[in-house]
Amino acid sequence: MGVAELPWCVSAVLHTLPSGLPDAAPQNASEVERVKAEISTLQDVIKAAQDKQKAAKDECKKLEKDMEEFKTNKDGKIEELKVSL
């Protein structure tokens, strides 16, 4: 096969592909952009969930501390809770 025949062979191969490489490139690029956007969105969702989880853990620690204080000093803790409400 000579050099002159190469473009014809490449063209023939491209025409046998399901969508052809030149046509598939824009589809692939848009798919890549869509996936990048989805990843970014999911990263934001994960960050928000982690922030909520940390706040919930902090609240649990506070409640556990209050419960422990209540066990040792019921009257004082009851008065403290009445004032905070």
Image (cartoon, grey):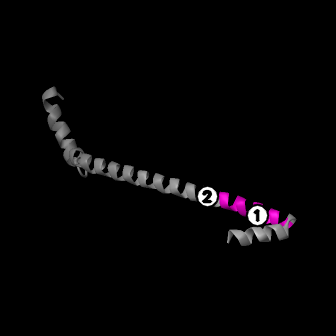
Magenta stretch, main secondary structure, is helix
Please identify the quadrant where the N terminus is shown: top left
Residue pointed to by mark 1: 66
Magenta-tinted stretch:
58-71
Q: Is residue 80 left or right of residue 38?
A: right
Q: Is residue 75 magenta?
A: no
Please rate how many residues cluster around mark 1, counting C-alpha atoms within 10 Å: few if below 14, some from 14 to 19, many from 20: few
46 and 80: which is toward the camera? 80
The numbered mark at residue 30 is none
Residue on which the image places disc 2: 55
Residue at 52%, 53% (x, y): give it.
Answer: 47
Q: Is residue 59 above or below residue 18?
A: below
Question: Residue furthest toward the right?
Answer: 72
Instruction: State yes or no: residue 65 in magenta.
Output: yes
The residue lying furthest to the left in this view is: 4
State the residue in front, 11 or 79.
Answer: 79
Whether residue 59 sits left or right of residue 13 in the image: it is right
- Under mark 2, the amino acid is Ala
> What amino acid is labelled 1 in the image?
Asp
Instruction: Decide which of 67, 75 is in the foreground and name it.
Output: 75
**Side (left or right) of 35 relative to 55:** left
